[in-house]
Image (cartoon, rainbow, N blue to C red):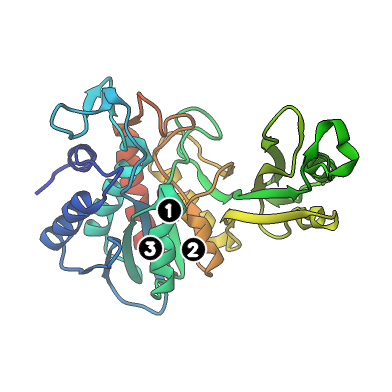
Amino acid sequence: MTATVAELTRELVAVPSHEDETAVGDEIEAWLRRETAADVTRDEVGNVIARKGAGDRSLALVGHHDVVEPDESQLEADGEYVVEERDGRLYGRGTADMKGAVAAAMLAFRDAEPAGELVFASFVGEEVGGVGARRAIDEGFAPDYAVVGEGSTGYSSPGVTDVAVAHKGRRASTITARGTAAHASEADAGENAVYRATDAVDVVRDLEPPAVDAAGETLAGSVVVTEIEGGRAWNVVPDRCEVTIDERTVPGERAALERVEEFEGVEWTVDQDLPPMRCDDREFAETVLEAADAAQSGSPELVTKPHATDAGWLSEAGTECVICGAAEPGEAHTADESVSIDVLGRCEETYRKVAESWPR
C-alpha cells in the first residue's frame, strides 16, 4: 500500500507521459483496482474513471496525467523522468502539472466516506486541447459538481491554496487575406493582400473584449495579434497574408472578430477554442473554500485563474466546477518544475473533506 501522497506522486511522476500516457494510466488504473472497491473503467483514449458511493447527485475529483515534453535535465538515461526531493518539495516534470494533485485525489477518493456518488477521473490529452475530457463528455461523463486539481496555490498570497471559481478560455484564430499578385513596379495591376490584412488588423485593435465579474474581481478578456506573414519577394505585390490572433475569452460574449470578414478578400477561421469556466453555485464554492480553510493555517480566498483547463469543457457541458490544486503560478512547464509536499497533503485533505460534505 502506498502510504503517503509524496510516495504516490513520485511513482506517477517517474513514468513518462508526454508522448504516450498509456503506462502512467496503467499505474493509476492498477492502483485504484488494488486500493479500492470502486467501479474502475478505462476508455479507448486512455481516460481512467472510478466511481463509488451512491446518490442523486455526483461529485468528481478531476485531473490529467499527460504532461508537456520534459527538459533534458528532467530525463533519466533510461528515459524515465527524474524525481528529486529537496527542501520539502518534489522536483520533476509533472510534479506541479499535475500528477501531484492526481495522487492527492486518488488518496482522497480511496479514503473518503462520500456524501453522494464520488467520481475520480484522470484524463489524457489536457495539454493538447482537452482531448480526454472532450471524449469523456461525448461518452456521457456528466458529474453534477467537480473539483479540478489544477493549480490554485499562491494566488491570494504566497503559500495559500485558494479556490478558483472562474478562468479564461482561449480562442486561437487566423485572418487570411487574399489578393492578386502583380509586379511591384505596376502595383495598381494587383490587389495587395497585406493592405487588406492590415485593414482587418485595425478592426482587431479597436475591438473591446468582454469582461465579467467573478469572485469580486473583473475577469477581462483580451485580443492580440501575435503573428503576421505575407509576401514572397521584394518586387511582387503579395497575393496572400495571414494574421494570427490570440484571444482570451470569458464566460458569455465573445469579441466580434467576425467583423473582419466585411472586407473583400478577407476570411476568418477559428483554429482552437478552449472554453472559459465560471462556477455559478456559490454554496458549492463556499463548501470547497471551507474545506481548504480547514486544511491549512493560511486564509484561502475565492479567486480567478488566467488560463484554460479541463474545467472549461466540463463547465460548458453543465458541470459546476471549481479549481483547487497544489501548483503555484510559474511552476508548470518549467525546467525546474516542483511542488510542495505539504501542499499536496493539504490538497488530499481538502478533497476528502469536500467529498464527505458535498453534495448536500
Would you identify the image quadrant in which residue 132 lies? bottom left
- Disc number at residue 60? 3
In the rendered image, the vertical position of residue 103 relative to residue 279, given as above or below: above
Query: Residue 38 location in percent, x, y?
Result: 20, 68
- The residue lying furthest to the right in this view is 188
- Rendered residue at 19%/37% (across/down): 14
In the rendered image, the vertical position of residue 15 relative to residue 339, given as above or below: below
Instruction: Work out whether residue 274 or residue 122 is closer to the camera in this orientation and state it.
Output: 274
In the rendered image, the vertical position of residue 32 relative to residue 331, given as above or below: below
Query: Residue 219 location in percent, x, y?
Result: 68, 46
Q: Disc 1 marks which residue?
A: 148
- Disc number at residue 338? none
- Label 3: few (<14), some (14–19) or many (≥20) C-alpha neighbours in 10 Å: many
Q: Quadrant of the C terminus?
A: bottom left
SS for dot 3: strand
Distance between the alpha carbons at the discs numbered 1 and 3: 8 Å
Number of numbered tags placed on the structure image = 3
- Left or right of residue 204, residue 307 in this image: left
Return the disc, 1 or 2, that comes first in the chain's sequence: 1
Q: Is residue 88 among what the camera can see?
A: no
Q: Amino acid at mark 3?
A: Ala
- Rendered residue at 52%/69% (across/down): 317
SS for dot 2: helix
Return the disc, 3 or 2, that comes first in the chain's sequence: 3
